[in-house]
Image (tube, rainbow, N blue to C red):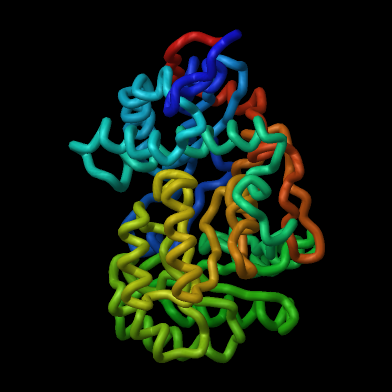
């Protein structure tokens, strides 16, 4: 009779046997401009660098994870992931939190946030996907879902490079598709244009459609005060990133002064940074980005802090992942609808009546498309397939 594995020793079929990393570059149909472009801080965005991690155990269980970067950082993320990946071979795939810490210490000399943590995020998401697939559950169900759908809003049709007439067309199409809210980019050098565009969309859609604005950190404190005061008239769901992402005191002052909620957090790159933001009461709506903070493990720490502080949660970007994480948050969340990543996956999310349904397929419920394989520029493999 065979003996059970010693305590702390993984069953053979749970050991990580093989890891495949791929660096994929997703081209955007049109160059994307927000306030950072119009103020000269950045160039228009033409592609998104995706880092995919595919993990397989000795027993043949598989998981897919991803992270991303915009404008810069893609080669760096791939290089860091390639360096730390061997640390996972032979490890128990169930011990996700411990493995996150192990990967963090494997690259500790370059810090515990930013590019290094984002590279770790691809492994972390893959391990959660693997565990949920093995259990036959969606990721949301594995984490403990509170609902089977989340409120969703569209951003991709509201960028500053979009002419006003097209802005109205895009907004109307999004609502007709079943998306529940519209977010517009603001922060132009001519602030009157911001007011004109928001006013036009509000008139066109009426008061029954949720409307948000996003300044992408481009205002100083006096300008933010003036613009937030003007925007009070438009019944907005929130005003996003009116100030620099790390100006917690300034955001807290705006949140205290105005009825319209202040949203921020998407640019922060660790649970610790979000904790500092929450302690300052710098947001009414917290917007963590799971790939950007290092995966699901740190995201859950952020969500727990947000819940304790009574904050609304609205995860940034990557709807294919955040639909699950939003469904697992105790109170209603908003998830950002971007169709940009859709060509990378074979599956599509179901959207209707202002809500995005959580996939019932195991794990994240997505698989890489042939197009994603075609856009891959680099690959690296470790270990041996089962």
Q: Nearer the viewer, residue 14 or 25?
A: 14
Q: Residue furthest left?
A: 109
Residue 195's place in the image compared with 229, above or below, is above
Identified at 30% across, 47% down, the residue is: 113
Query: How far across and down, in percent of the image, does residue 71 sit?
Result: 39, 43
Q: Is residue 310 left or right of residue 73?
A: right
Left or right of 122 in this view: 342: right
In the displayed orientation, state which residue is furthest to the front: 1
| Residue 136 position within the rendered picture, expressed as x and y whole percent measured from the top left | 71, 35
Residue at screen point 74% across, 56% down: 148
Check the picture and name the quadrant holding the N terminus: top right
Of residues 357 and 93, which is closer to you in this image? 93
Residue 155 picture quarter: bottom right
Toward the viewer: 272 or 9?
9
Tell me, yes or no, if residue 274 can be seen here. Answer: yes
Q: Residue at x 57, y 31 (%)?
A: 64
Q: Is residue 377 visible?
A: no
Decide if residue 242 is on the left or right side of residue 365. left
Image spot of residue 186 (x, y percent): 48, 71
Above or below, 281 relative to 7? below
Residue beneath the point at 43% across and 79% down: 191
Q: Is residue 313 above or below residue 371?
A: below
Q: Is residue 62 left or right of residue 72?
A: right
When asked about the image quadrant of residue 163, the answer is bottom right
Q: Tell me where residue 93 appears, x and y as whole percent.
A: 49, 28
Which quadrant does the C terminus fall into?
A: top right
């Amino acid at each position: 009779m065979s003996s059970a594995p010693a305590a702390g020793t993984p069953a053979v079929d749970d050991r990580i046997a093989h890891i495949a990393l791929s660096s994929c570059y997703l081209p955007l149909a049109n160059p994307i401009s927000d306030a950072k472009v119009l103020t000269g801080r950045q160039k228009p965005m033409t592609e998104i660098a995706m880092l995919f991690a595919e993990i397989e155990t000795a027993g043949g269980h598989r998981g897919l994870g991803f992270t991303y970067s915009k404008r810069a950082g893609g080669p760096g993320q791939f290089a860091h992931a390639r360096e730390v990946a061997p640390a996972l071979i032979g490890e128990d795939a169930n011990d996700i939190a411990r493995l996150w810490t192990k990967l963090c210490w494997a690259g500790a000399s370059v810090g515990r946030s930013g590019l290094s943590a984002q590279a770790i995020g691809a492994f972390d998401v893959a391990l959660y996907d693997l565990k949920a697939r093995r259990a036959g559950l969606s990721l949301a169900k594995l984490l403990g879902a509170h609902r089977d759908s989340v409120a969703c809003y569209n951003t991709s049709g509201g960028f500053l490079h979009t002419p006003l007439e097209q802005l109205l067309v895009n907004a109307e199409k999004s609502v007709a598709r079943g998306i529940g809210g519209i977010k517009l980019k603001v922060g132009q050098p001519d602030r009157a244009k911001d007011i004109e565009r928001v006013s036009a969309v509000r008139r066109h859609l009426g008061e029954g459609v949720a409307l948000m604005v996003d300044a992408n950190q481009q205002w100083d404190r006096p300008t933010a005060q003036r613009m937030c005061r003007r925007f009070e008239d438009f019944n907005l769901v929130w005003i996003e990133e009116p100030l620099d992402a790390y100006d917690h005191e300034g955001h807290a002052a705006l949140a205290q002064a105005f009825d319209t909620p202040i949203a921020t957090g998407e640019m922060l790159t660790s649970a610790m940074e979000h904790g500092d933001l929450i302690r300052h009461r710098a947001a009414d709506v917290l917007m963590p980005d799971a790939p950007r903070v290092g995966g699901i493990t740190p995201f859950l720490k952020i969500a727990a802090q947000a819940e304790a502080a009574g904050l609304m949660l609205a995860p940034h970007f990557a709807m294919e992942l955040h639909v699950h994480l939003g469904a697992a948050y105790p109170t209603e969340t908003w998830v950002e609808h971007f169709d940009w990543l859709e060509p990378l996956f074979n599956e599509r999310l179901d959207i209707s009546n202002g809500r995005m349904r959580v996939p019932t397929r195991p794990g994240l419920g997505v698989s890489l498309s042939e197009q994603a394989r075609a856009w891959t520029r680099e690959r690296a493999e470790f270990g041996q397939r089962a």
